[in-house]
Amino acid sequence: MNRIFIFIAITFIFSCKKHNNNTSATNSVKQFHKSIAIGETYAQNPEILHASKGTDEEINIVYPEADQLKWIQFSSNKVFFKKQLQPTGNFKGFWSKGFIKNKNDNFVIVGTYWQYENSLGSMYISTADKRGNLLGTKVISLKSGENIRGDIIYPARDGGYFVASTANHSFDITKITENAEVKWRRNGLFISQVTDISGIKSLAEDSKGNIYVATLQNVYGSGFSPQECIIKLSPDGNIIWIKSLEIRNMDGHNNSDYNIKYLIVDENDVLYAFEEFHYVGRIMMTKFDTDGNILALKNFGSGIIGLYDVQYIDQDFYLLTGGANPAKTLNLKMNQNFEITKKGIVLAVGDLPWLPGKFFKSPSDQSTDYILAGKDEQDNNAWQYIRLDEAWKYPCYNYSMQEVNLKDHLDFSIKTWDTTQFETATYSTEDFITADAVFELKNYTTSNMVTGVFCEQKNN
């Protein structure tokens, strides 16, 4: 009997020592750095709209081409498919703009669709499974015949979606259920001859269903200078407050060219904004309370020039940024007080000028060790994808980490806008018609696409 217990114990110990590629045990992560060719000729690589991974045999990249999106799925050894959404039969025109992964592990594509000659646009929502099979398409039209667009899509906590656009300088957000039924739409949000919205940059939702939207706002009479705004909406889409933020004396420059790229709400409903200041080459982070008051405002010291991606996982922020040497991409881990707790060089590929990148979104959203970069050193029409080890060391070259530090920025002002001045239009479920539509995911050849090893891993 004792021998049986000893055998079971030994078997248990050995089984516990076997780690898969997603564990955090020391030396358990197999690091690699490879490339995937697009198979098409472009002056430069298209921007990466979406990057996600399931298993190591299921890596997805979505990028725009003109008014359409192309979706590629590949593994470390082969390409599975390249597809593009398209209506069947005769159609006047359409475009695809937004792409996300939903809670059911399926993918959602949003865009605008003209069904008949001289008609205005309708919004469509298409869903596909992880193997690129189209599940269905719904077209959403206004009964009045007005135009409704689908440009950007964000997941909602209840399983539905927020679809946003800024056509004709008009703020437009539509809340849609998981089954593509419209709950409400808010459209307008401008003061005639005073201000209008020029772009929706990001959207986030708190635990109570309140919605935060980052916009750029053109304020007339002030040299047409854009102002950065954050708008808070109630769960039913009513405006709670609108605040604009002006950053002064950023490296001696007033009214620098700023751009909120990511809004994130944490588990305590604290709001964070991450933004680029292009003109002075800086990145800034802002922490707000639920009333839009600033709790902290920090920016990087010199040498951090581009904000490529941000994820919030397990109460930490992960930032993918550009380093002082523009051929380097940096991975930074930061806590909720904007203190850097880990840093590493992700990519260094000679003298390429710009390397936009993305984190791969893992199945559990608990992984930041897969990175997608914008160009291949040997082929400008290919991407590089990297898996890091626990130390975040670059696998091929011994580059030293540059100094990265943060400082408080205290010179700013907040303006609270009178929401009664803004002209808005409210639409309810009864204003819309939702109908099935016949779309297909058209196959593109993958014979001219190849994957390969970018550099051989060196043993540390």
Image (cartoon, rainbow, N blue to C red):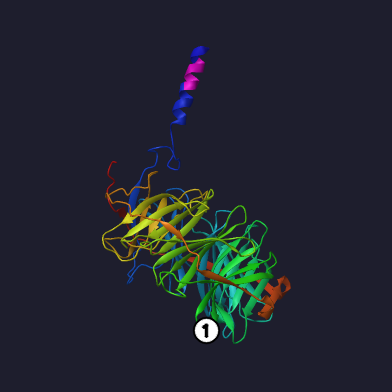
Quadrant of residue 278 in the image? bottom left
Give x and y (percent) for residue 428.
71, 72
Q: Which residue does the image show at 58% across and 80% down from the upper left?
A: 196
Number of numbered discs visible in the structure rendering? 1
Q: Which residue is mark 1?
A: 222
Q: Residue furthest right?
A: 430
Res. 69 visible in picture: yes
- Assess disc 1: are there few (<14), some (14-19) or many (≥20) residues with their C-alpha within 10 Å of its C-alpha: few
Work out whether 116 lies above or below 381: below
Q: Residue at x 39, y 52 (%)?
A: 75
Using the rendered image of the protein, determine whether residue 131 is visible from the camera's viewpoint: no
Looking at this view, is 240 or 385 the one in front? 240
Q: In this view of the protein, which residue sits in the foreground, 7 or 272?
A: 272
Q: Position of residue 124 (x, y in %)?
A: 58, 70
Which residue is drawn at the image coordinates 53% and 76% (left, top)? 227
Does 119 sit left or right of 429 as displayed? left
Task: Please indicate whether residue 42 sits to the left or right of residue 181 in the image.
Answer: left
Q: Position of residue 147 (x, y in %)?
A: 61, 80
Q: Looking at the image, which is closer to me, 328 or 7?
A: 328
Identify the main secondary structure in magenta.
helix
312 or 363: nearer the viewer: 312
Q: Which residues are magenta?
A: 4-9
Residue 249 rendering spot, x and y as whole percentages: 45, 71
Q: Quadrant of the C terminus?
A: top left
Residue 18 colored in magenta in the image: no
Residue 289 sits in quarter: bottom right
Q: Amino acid at mark 1?
A: Ser
Is disc 1 placed on a helix, strand or loop? loop
Q: Is residue 140 left or right of residue 152?
A: right
Residue 8 located within the stretch drawn in magenta = yes
